[in-house]
Amino acid sequence: MTAQASDAEQDLTIGTLEESDRRLGIICGHCSRFRYLKSARYAADLTLSALGASLTCSRCGSDDVQAIAISRDPENGYWPAERS
């Protein structure tokens, strides 16, 4: 898992994530909290950059939140663990 999403990944839509077997995650730039979000709660044509701009961290309240595409670990097939 990378903490910084590329510009191309920021232009991904929620629908694209589901089609490519990836999950929606958020990471807070202030407290480094990483959590998964249910992608079904958002419109399929919503971009990750637009989603990240509308969210705040539920732990510290910061608006420095980035929505990112998460892939399984290629070596073991597991999803990265959330961190608080």
Image (tube, helix red, strand yellow):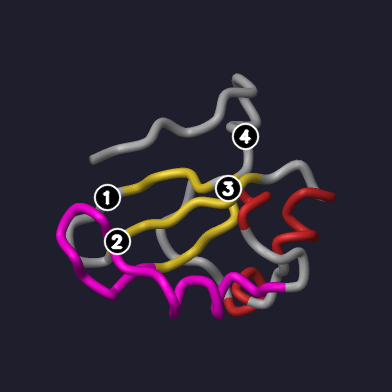
Q: CA distance from mark 4 to mark 3?
A: 7 Å
Specify which label sits upstream in the sequence, 2 or 3: 2
Q: Which residue is mark 3?
A: 70
Specify which label sits upstream in the sequence, 2 or 4: 2
| Kind of residue at badge 2 | Cys
Q: Give the residue displayed 70% in from the left and 69% down from the top.
A: 12
Asked if residue 71 lies in the magenta stretch, the reply is: no
Q: Give the residue displayed 79% in from the left and 60% down from the top.
A: 16
Residue 49 appears left or right of 60: right
Secondary structure beneath label 1: loop
Specify which label sits upstream in the sequence, 1 or 2: 2
Q: CA distance from mark 3 to mark 1?
A: 14 Å
> Magenta stretch mostly in which secondary structure?
loop
Q: Which residue is mark 2?
A: 28
Q: Which residue is mark 4?
A: 72
Q: CA distance from mark 2 to mark 3?
A: 15 Å
| Kind of residue at badge 3 | Ile
Q: Which residue is mark 1?
A: 33
Q: Quadrant of residue 79?
A: top right
Q: Nearer the viewer, mark 2 or mark 4?
A: 2
Which of these two is toward me, 66 or 3?
66
Residue 45 appears left or right of 11: right
